Amino acid sequence: MLNYPMQTLSADAIICGAGSAGLAAAYYLSQQGLTNIILVDKNEPLSQTSSKSGENYRTWWPNETMVGFISRSIDLMDEIVEQSANAIQLDRRGYLYVSEKQTLDSLDVYKSLDVGGMRVHEQVGSSYSPFQEESNLNGADILIGNDVIKHHFPHLSENITLAIHARRAGSLSAQQLGMYHLEEAKAKGLKHLNAELIDVLQDDEGVSGVKLKTTEGDIIIESRILVNAAGPFVNEIAAMLGETLAIKNVFQQKIAFRDHEQVLDRKMPFTIYIDEQELNWSEEDKALLADEPSYDWFLDNFQGGLHIKPEGGLGSILVKLGWAFNQESEEPQWDKHSLEEFPDLVIRGASRFIPELERYIGKLPKPILHYGGYYTKTEENMPLIGPMKTKGAFVLGALSGFGTMACCGAGELVAQHVLGKDLPGYAQALAPSRYDDLELLEHLRATALNGEL
Ligand SMILES: Cc1cc2nc3c(=O)[nH]c(=O)nc-3n(C[C@H](O)[C@H](O)[C@H](O)COP(=O)(O)OP(=O)(O)OC[C@H]3O[C@@H](n4cnc5c(N)ncnc54)[C@H](O)[C@@H]3O)c2cc1C
């Protein structure tokens, strides 16, 4: 049998993964002067976790590292808005966090952070305007008392007594942002290969290349730089280097349906119920669920964070809901089935703070779009961006439930690491080397409240 030599290419850098993260890395590496980059993905660009995003963003984070990092990412998104006539469809409606239980004291942590001022409104007729979309608004408007809250948001429950409207926040199109990064990087010379990375080659100097499987046979690409942006599979790539990253994968879900009854105000901000809750089952349902071991957890206390927003603009009746209540980590699989009962659980939970949604319990209009993807996350729910142990290998991952909003900042940061540029103040806390600094790690774990949506 004839033994044909394997095709060999060479590149200044290889990026594994064409999700939001890998595409942003390609864009910022090429912006910063690297032209011979090869981007590898076994699937279509943006077809995996990045296609499941709720596409929301905010600077309202509970620790200084995430505030600095995500604020920078939003600055970069704003630049793209300017350069592209808002091809990424970014709006600034804000995030509206609502609660029946929390008080103003719960916001003390934000006072020491660079998230902008807090403006308290206790009276109807104050200067607060919920629907301003100006991009220069920052900080948060805090509404106290149900009167003022119902005045501005009549669809909310009369039990809601605190509403925090974070203003440097809103929605964008993750697909458009990723395609912008891809097209701009291609214009600067990026090559994109549809292939599976099956091995990383090493020599005495660290990474020396990768082996790819393609429909036309295997290929070797020689390169001294590998950016591991493989989403839920970052640890498969790390294992090829004999390394393990401290991440886990947790499956989270969303639904979208048509709000035929027009319960929601189409201009309402992305709204998040921050209290935990037990769902409103009938006594009969409760008895049935209590008797069924695989369903009795439906009676448990569910964590806060259920979120809802109108989707598709003023002319649409689509609404999107999500609730990242799953805590169980697992080995990632792409064909994972969503929990059949999730739509019912989420609509019951949402009717707690938007009572009119109760009319959809047990009769959600079909078709219901129901999908899910992995939050790839570290224990402290902060990303991993920077050098791995093997020389020449960099990770850009663990973007959890914030990878759409973080990808610009993350892409820029990994490019700065790769090219040996000056690093911003938040770089150290996001690098994998943070696990060697126990004091820093302890501080991050103490301050990084969950914050995932
Ligand atoms: C339900 C849900 C809602 C979310 N909502 C939001 C939100 O509102 N706002 C926000 O900012 N973020 C949100 N996120 C998070 C965001 O979607 C993710 O953080 C982000 O998409 C992760 O991007 P990624 O590029 O790291 O991963 P992915 O998009 O998964 O990309 C990884 C790529 O690597 C490829 N790959 C893996 N292994 C190999 C290999 N060996 N060879 C070749 N290719 C390989 C895969 O094919 C894939 O294309 C949400 C996530 C989920 C699941």
Image (spheres, rainbow, N blue to C red):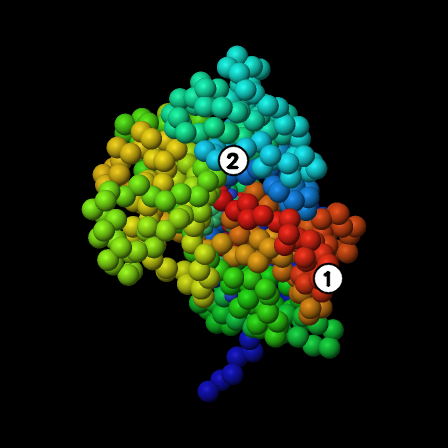
The residue that label 2 is drawn on is: 102
- Residue 295 is situated, as x and y percent measured from the top left of the image, at 29, 56
Secondary structure, mark 2, is: loop
Q: Residue at x 26, y 32 (%)?
A: 359
Determine the secondary structure under disc 1.
loop
What's the amino acid at mark 2? Gln
* Labels 1, 2: front one: 2
Q: Residue visible at 45% across and 23% down?
A: 146
Where's residue 155, x and y in %? 38, 25
Q: Quadrant of residue 336?
A: bottom left
Residue at image coords 45%, 56%: 327
Sequence-wise, the earlier of marks 1 and 2 is 2
Residue 342 relative to residue 143: left or right = left
The residues tagged by marks 1 and 2 sit, at their Cα atoms, a distance apart of 34 Å
* Residue 400 in view (yes/no): yes
| Residue assigned mark 1 | 437
Residue drawn 32% across and 38% down? 257
Q: In the depicted view, which residue is nearer to us: 1 or 257?
A: 257
Expressed as whole percent of the image width and height from the top left, the position of residue 370 reads 34, 47
Res. 185 in view: no
Badge 1 amino acid: Asp
